[in-house]
Amino acid sequence: MTAGGVRGYGLHLIADLDRQELRVVGATIDTNYPEGLMLSRPVKSLCRSLCISLVAAPLLAACAGHTGATLGSGVGDRMLRDAPWVAGRALPAQRNPLAVFPVAWQAGATQPVFMEPEADSTAPLGQLRVAVQRHLDSLTVGAATAPLVGTGLIPPDVRFGCPSTNQQECDASASDAAIGRGATWHRLAVANPSPAWRAALRQRLDSLQVTHAVFVTLEIGQYLPRQRGITGSKYVTLGRDHEVALPWLTSLETPVSVIQLTGVVVDADGRAVRIAAEGLSVKRTPLLLSAVDAQALIRDDDVRTLLRAPRNDLPGQPLVWQAGLEALLRSLALR
């Protein structure tokens, strides 16, 4: 994960349903991502208050424009209640072609890497990334180009999911309204790339004779469930015209893990112009686990299911990840 986080202490409650394993891990935790499974809200609240009061004010002044900070990134942080999950300005309809960089897998985007499935080329996540890449190539968004690789080349980091003060624990409600009813907000932001990456990008775009580029990332995010109607039916909003029903006993206070796509359009200086996110698939957490502030992990079987799952509600019944990528590009105003 990108640099610039404040460090605190906490406990993880790890629940792996496939392996029927439950274990508690005490560790130093980087607050750049929320704990996927955790305990002890009073302890975390105390750590949050102490950390914020001691370091937040000086860091805000120092981090603007710095690698990993969202200040000065080109698109300000947005708190969004409804999809589409998008922020920033659209490029003109009449524009030069864009450079399209390969789809990347971002490990540890919102939870520790050891809590995520393997993502090598033979694993389901790796297969999903390749499938998304091929579909992106077929949509002819722009001129495909090789990734920027090298020491110190840190790309912009689009962050989307349920908000939290310390990025360890999602806030279930941002107001006095009933939890899950009209008060469920999600945060969309983008962190600055490194200066070396900005320089490498400008050189690449100059060589391609283009002024903008698009980057798409596959990752795991954290979304909050919602409820509606007299019966209080539960669901999660994954993205543009895409909702998934959840069991009635689903907790509204515990986030669910979501396989998602994020995207960013940047100019030649590496500043974000427009950012977006689109959820693809959600991992439901049983009530007994969510009652102890635990969260089910996404496993290989969940990714295999996503690879072949259709969107039956759409014309032609495209695969979920195909429809998700196309929705993300529409949010980025590239289709």
Image (cartoon, grey):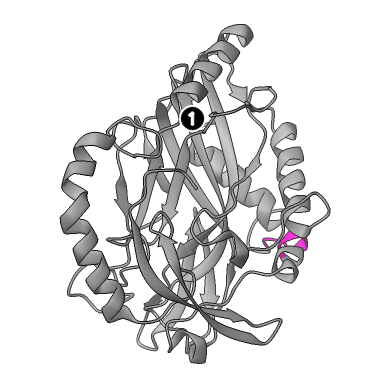
Neighbour class for label 1 at 10 Å: few (<14), some, many (≥20)?
many
Determine whether, in the image, residue 157 is placed left or right of residue 283: left
Residue 299: image location, x then y, percent:
69, 70
**Mark 1 belongs to which amino acid?**
Val
Residue 92: image location, x then y, percent:
44, 20
Rendered view: 97 above or below 25: above
Determine whether, in the image, residue 183 is placed left or right of residue 217: left
Q: Residue at x 47, y 16 (%)?
A: 268
Residue 132: image location, x then y, percent:
71, 45
Q: Residue at x 34, y 29 (%)?
A: 74
As for residue 308 lying within the magenta part, the answer is yes
From where the camera sits, is residue 335 visible? no
Q: Give the range drawn in magenta.
A: 306-311
Rendered view: 95 above or below 57: above
In the image shown, does 39 or 329 lie closer to the viewer? 39
As for residue 309 lying within the magenta part, the answer is yes
The number of discs equals 1
In the image shown, does 234 or 40 lie closer to the viewer? 40
**Quadrant of residue 162 in the image?**
bottom left
In the image shown, does 227 or 28 lie closer to the viewer? 28
From where the camera sits, is residue 225 visible? yes
Residue 171: image location, x then y, percent:
30, 69
Q: Which residue lies furthest to the right in this view?
A: 122
Location of mark 1 (residue): 265
Q: Residue furthest bottom?
A: 288
